[in-house]
Image: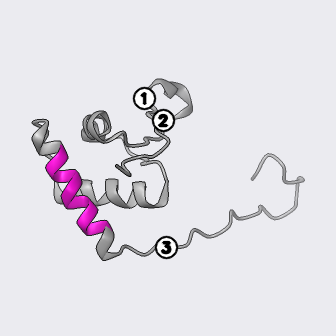
Amino acid sequence: MCATTAPGAPARRPPPVSDLPITTDHYERAAQLFNRCRAKGIAGSAIDLIICAVSAGYGAPVYTTDVDFRRYAGVLKLKLHAPPRDRRLAMRSEDAIRR
């Protein structure tokens, strides 16, 4: 039950999340990000860097507990979502990888 739902009333569902398309530009950007990380001595997986590229392309933070993304964020200025209990992990950038 949602905190704003009256007792006995049906719980309201959150709005559905729509899928965002992944384009050729995202894959090309992922390759650039891979090269940027590699130049700094950080090895990244193709999937992780596609996630970074899509995140940057849509201006959305990455929601993860994978520590690799903190290393990528140090090089890529990636936006990471930090759980409410530890906002110190959030890394922000106005242009989030758009360089």
Residue 74 highlighted magenta (yes or no): no
Asked if disc 1 and disc 3 are in contact, CB closer than 8 Å, the reply is: no
Q: Nearer the viewer, residue 76 or 63?
A: 76
Q: Secondary structure at mark 1?
A: helix
According to the picture, the residue beneath numbered tag 1 turns out to be: 89
Q: Where in the figure is residue 9, as x and y percent of width and height?
A: 87, 62
For badge 2, the amino acid type reads Ala
Question: Compared to 43, does 26 lie above or below?
Answer: below
Q: Disc 2 versus disc 3: distance between alpha carbons? A: 22 Å
Question: Residue type at mark 3?
Answer: Asp
First to last magenta residue range? 26-36
Residue drawn where x is 43% and y is 42% of the image: 79
**What residue is rendered at 32% in x and 67% in y?**
26
Circles 1 and 2, Cβ within 8 Å, touching? The answer is yes
Q: CA distance from mark 1 to mark 2?
A: 6 Å
Question: Could you tell me which residue is drawn at 47 percent across and 48 percent down?
Answer: 61
Horizontal side of 57 relative to 12 (left or right) equals left
How far across and down, in percent of the image, does residue 1 sit?
75, 53
First-in-chain label (1 vs 2): 2
Q: Position of residue 63 (x, y in %)?
A: 43, 47
Magenta span has 29? yes
Q: Is residue 41 left or right of residue 49?
A: left
Q: Is disc 1 surrounded by few (<14), some (14 to 19) or many (20+) residues within 10 Å?
A: few
User: What residue does disc 2 label?
Assistant: 82
Task: Note whether 17 is above or below 6 in the view shown.
Answer: below
The dot on residue 19 is 3
Prevalent SS, magenta region: helix
Dot 3 falls on a residue whose secondary structure is: loop
